[in-house]
Amino acid sequence: MGKKVSVPTLETDRLILRQWSKKDAEALYDYAKDPDVGPHAGWKPHANVAESRFIIKELFRQNMTWAIVEKETGTVIGSIGLEPDKFRPDVESREMGYSLAKSRWKRGYMTEAAKRIIRYAFDELNLTVLMIRTSETNFRSQRVIEKCGFTYEGTLRRAYRLYDRSIREVRCYSMLREEYEELWEKEV
């Protein structure tokens, strides 16, 4: 088992982004079992609460991954994280990834969470580049990426093997520090 990574608690108007806890396994399973959630991001729906508990312990707690909590209900509704950018190993760069409960789609929650993580990535981690990848068919994710101001870099053909062993194309986007600074000036 690797070293646990601690993440700071961050807030937005409607959300709290916080460290995952073992107690969140039931809430994770509740949305991660949905076949409309995981496969869009390349992972299989969770089979049971034990699998969700394992993901929290071995993946989320070992990496810089936040639980997305809806302030109004106190419910965990998604995850968002930053991991090393394997395409830019010698640059201060991270890759952002996320998932959201289907019951919370089309409310702007993921864009709100992503913008807060973007701010954290550039202001606190002092990144040079932030990147994100998504599938050619994940139009909801593409819309979040566009709303956040990322630039489309191109599509890698046959670049990502899914849990079912199929291989798909991947759309790549990035945001440079200068682009972030220009966008952030407009937001303030």
Image: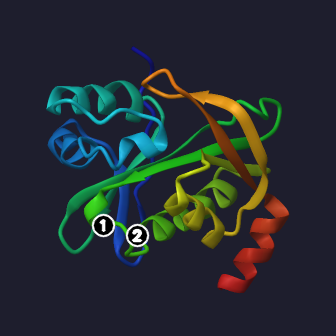
Question: Can you say whether 183 is above or below 81 in the image?
Answer: below
Q: What is the x, y in percent for residue 151?
A: 77, 61
Residue 104 is marked as 1
Look at mark 2 in the image and give the residue it sits on.
109
The residue lying toward the viewer, choosing from 120 and 28, is: 28
Colour treatment of the image? rainbow
One can see residue 127 in this view:
no
Instruction: Report if the CB atoms under discs 1 and 2 are less than 8 Å apart.
Output: yes
Image quadrant of residue 53? top left
Circle nearer the N terminus (1, 2): 1
Q: Quadrant of the C terminus?
A: bottom right
Give the answer, above or below, for where 7 lies relative to 112. above
SS at circle 2: helix
Q: How many marks?
A: 2
Using the image as rendered, state which of residue 24 and residue 11 is in the foreground.
24
**Image side of residue 97 versus residue 60, left or right:** right
Q: Which mark is residue 11?
A: none
Identify residue type, mark 2. Tyr
Query: Percent position (x, y) of residue 35?
Result: 30, 44
Instruction: Return the x and y of residue 27 as percentages of the image width and height.
Output: 19, 48
What residue do we see at 39% from left, 14% from top? 1
Distance between mark 1 and mark 2 Cα atoms: 7 Å
Q: Residue at x 73, y 35 (%)?
A: 157
User: What amino acid is labelled 1 in the image?
Assistant: Arg
- Horizontally, residue 22 falls left or right of residue 135, namely left
Determine crowd level at label 1: few under 14, some 14-19, many 20+ residues with C-alpha closer than 10 A: some
Looking at the image, can residue 126 be seen?
yes
Q: Is residue 162 left or right of residue 37?
A: right
